Image: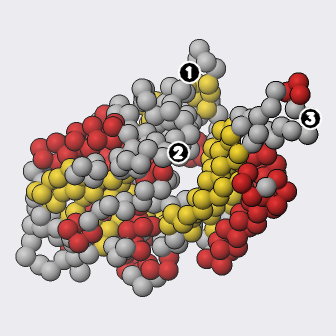
Amino acid sequence: MSTALERFLRYTTFSTQSVEKTGKVPSSEGQMVFAKAVAKELEELGLSDVRVDEHAYVTATLPANTDRKIPTIGFNAHLDTALEVTGANVKARVVHYEGGDIVLNESLGVVMSPVDFPDLNDYVGQDIVVTDGTTLLGSDDKAGMAAIMGAVDHLVHHPEIKHGAVKVSFTPDEEIGHGASLLDIEAFGADFAYTVDAGPVGQINYETFNAARADIKVHGRAVHPGTSKDKMLNATLLGTELLALLPPAETPSHTEKYEGFYHVTSFKGAVEEATVSLIVRDHDRTKFAQRKEFMKRAVKWMQDKYGADRFELELSDTYYNMRDVLEKHMHIVETATQAMEALGITPKIVPIRGGTDGSQLTYRGLPCPNIFYGGHNAHGKFEFLPVPSLEKSVKVILKILDIYASK
């Protein structure tokens, strides 16, 4: 078993799901537990400056082993897992895929089929890591962490491989938009970095959405249903009416590539009160501004109809398209492409339909494109990770370091 796979399977046993609106970083205690565990691994590997701060940020340095002038390169992955499906009590297992359906959970009738997920057909004859059909797997981004650790492990045990200083950072709460905003970039000390948070083999991302979050409170008026004619204002129905104003074809399930969307992430309602949360995203900055304006107009329309005090909108930007900055540092992207080609991997430069910690880090002064960890179907119980893909991620990290050391 490769060290990266062994680490990944161990990492899946930590419950690190982030939690919305706690007002704390990390938002869940499990992230701190995991941060301390992985910091111990870094110490055991002999890295220097290993630190876990009060917000569960893990940082460490693998010192250069040559006097040559080589850039200091960082590698980042996030500790937390997504919210859509539980990340507690994950029971990951490795199966040798021979094609056809994979029964994830016989008793519950959960089956992963290439009919629904045709990407499975690309991995016939390979070992893949799957769930038991009740949780997500957490390869986003524990596979990224395992790939970075696998690369560091290899360098530690092969000191004949010359490299510059390597900076490692594992950060909390990426899945709820925190964006590594508390990473001390100056203290981290990297000239540039890569997040290892893209999906299938070959992916490189240097374009992300511009992203905003919209939180809407709906204030209804509860009256006994038997005597409520012309009196009751049902907050749940008001929230539903608001959502009906959004373009039905501009949702994640109806868009692709550079098409933006409105995505409802949460709707909690009763008669008296309801809350609606959405994310608003577009690659184009002008269209992004138009989408935010549309949200404001939709809420204003409902306020005009039912009263200004019935709807409260909180609209805030989360991150911006990092292409605007990375276009000035394209050697970072080009080197990742060169590394993949040298390993026989076809690079796939695609716009990421989401964000990474690199989005904020890039705008804060640390240029940081995104490279693959190898997984598919993130954020759900049908998530799977081909083992050879994880191992290729390790090799790409090592090759990037080799290219910069050889210049």
Residue 255 visible in the snapshot: no
Disc 2 vs disc 3: Cβ atoms closer than 8 Å? no
> Which mark is drawn over residue 393?
none
Q: Which of marks 2 and 3 is in front?
A: 3
| Amino acid type assigned to the residue bearing label 2 in the image | Ala
Q: In the rendered image, which residue does mark 2 sit on?
A: 378
Q: In the rendered image, which residue does mark 1 sit on?
A: 105
The residue under the point 71% across, 37% down is 272
Give the CA distance from mark 2 to mark 1: 18 Å
Position above or below: 28 against 282: above
**Label 2 vs 1, first from the N-terminus:** 1
Judged from the image, the secondary structure of the residue bearing numbered disc 3 is loop
Q: How crowded is mark 3: few (under 14 residues within 10 Å), some or many (20 or more)?
A: few
Q: Which of 380 and 199 is in front in this view?
A: 380
Residue 266 visible in the snapshot: yes
Q: Quadrant of residue 160?
A: bottom left
Position above or below: 49 against 17: below
Disc 1 vs disc 3: Cβ atoms closer than 8 Å? no
Disc 2 vs disc 1: Cβ atoms closer than 8 Å? no
**Label 1 vs 3, first from the N-terminus:** 1
The residue under the point 48% across, 51% down is 176
Q: In the rendered image, which residue does mark 3 sit on?
A: 229
Q: Which of marks 2 and 1 is in front?
A: 2
| Amino acid type assigned to the residue bearing label 1 in the image | Asn
Q: In which quarter of the image is residue 406?
A: bottom left
The residue under the point 28% across, 48% down is 56
